[in-house]
Image: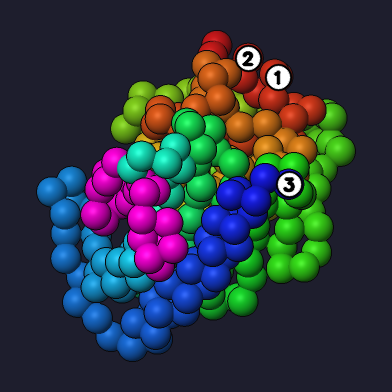
């Protein structure tokens, strides 16, 4: 295993856990909510958690770069970039819905090589390093073996995203062809695919920090992650994660 990857991966896990626990301290109290220019909410917990991760990484690897939801892009020179969403699911967080996570994705020369999704309220750490497997805490996870779309479980976030994107009809076509449908939004649908509890996660309206960590998790668990055109990128608003066995069929529906 590449030692540079491993040492950064270990730091990603501990930094995500510390930042998530910091955010949970705010979650269990009352806090003010601000709104950014795009009307999305942000709290002091988001900002504090991202700063904790950046500070920890900068102390250990001062030449690494960053891309974070709250503090933007900071180029580095090492080839490594940390992609951070300090609270994925801020809208859930501010309503005290416990399904939110601290996400840390690790990228090397443009490729996602590791990801961590720490769910503080549940004490669950999803983590993966390329070539070393994907885990939920200490349990190794793997995508499902479902091969029939009619027997599959579909996750998504909110119908509003598909409506705003003009993709409502396409989404309903996919929805009707699956056996079960659950609105597990944000990070949660992706980690369910990674651990074989769901088979498909389809999303529209994401940013790179929303999916960098979960792309690594899904792929290392044996699944597939692309945009709706089949490109393995985190830089488009439409993404699809599956167990791999259903990927081509689902892409065909999304492209119809």
Q: Which residue is tagged 3?
A: 1
Do the residues bearing badges 1 and 2 touch, measured as CB atoms within 8 Å? yes
How many neighbours does mark 1 have within 10 angstroms: few (below 14), some (14-19), or many (20 or more)?
few
Residue depicted at 77% across the width and 68% down the height = 138
Whether residue 1 is visible, yes or no, is yes
Q: Percent from the top left, x then y, of residue 3?
A: 65, 51
Secondary structure found at label 2: helix
Q: Which residue is mark 1?
A: 249
- 75 w.r.t. 12: above or below: above
Residue drawn at (50%, 49%), measured in percent from left and top? 105
Q: Which residues are magenta?
A: 56-75
Q: Residue at x 16, y 54 (%)?
A: 36
Instruction: Give residue 160's quadrant in the image.
Output: top left
Q: Residue furthest top?
A: 256
Work out how far the residue at label 1 is from the one at label 2, CA to CA, in angstroms: 5 Å
Q: Is residue 128 above or below residue 94?
A: above
Is disc 2 surrounded by few (<14), some (14 to 19) or many (20+) residues within 10 Å?
few
Q: Which x, y percent locates residue 29?
A: 33, 88
Mark 1 lies on a secondary structure that is: helix
């Amino acid at each position: 295993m590449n030692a540079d990857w491993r040492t950064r991966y270990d730091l990603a896990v501990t930094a995500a856990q510390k930042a998530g626990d910091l955010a949970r301290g705010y979650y269990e109290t009352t806090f003010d909510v601000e709104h950014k220019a795009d009307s999305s909410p942000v709290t002091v917990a988001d900002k504090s958690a991202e700063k904790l991760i950046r500070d920890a990484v900068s102390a250990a690897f001062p030449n690494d770069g960053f891309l974070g939801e709250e503090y933007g892009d900071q180029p580095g020179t090492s080839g490594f970039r940390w992609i951070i969403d300090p609270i994925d699911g801020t809208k859930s967080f501010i309503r005290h819905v416990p399904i939110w996570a601290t996400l840390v994705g690790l990228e090397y020369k443009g490729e996602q090589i590791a990801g961590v999704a720490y769910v503080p309220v549940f004490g669950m750490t999803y983590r993966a390093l390329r070539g070393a497997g994907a885990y939920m805490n200490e349990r190794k996870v793997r995508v499902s073996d479902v091969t029939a779309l009619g027997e599959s479980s579909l996750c998504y976030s909110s119908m509003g995203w598909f409506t705003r994107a003009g993709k409502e009809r396409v989404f309903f076509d996919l929805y009707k062809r699956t056996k079960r449908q659950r609105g597990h939004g944000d990070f949660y649908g992706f980690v369910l695919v990674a651990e074989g509890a769901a088979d498909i996660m389809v999303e529209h309206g994401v940013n790179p920090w929303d999916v960098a960590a979960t792309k690594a998790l899904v792929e290392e668990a044996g699944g597939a992650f692309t945009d709706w055109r089949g490109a393995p990128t985190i830089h488009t608003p439409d993404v699809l994660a599956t167990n791999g066995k259903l990927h081509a069929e689902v892409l065909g529906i999304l492209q119809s």
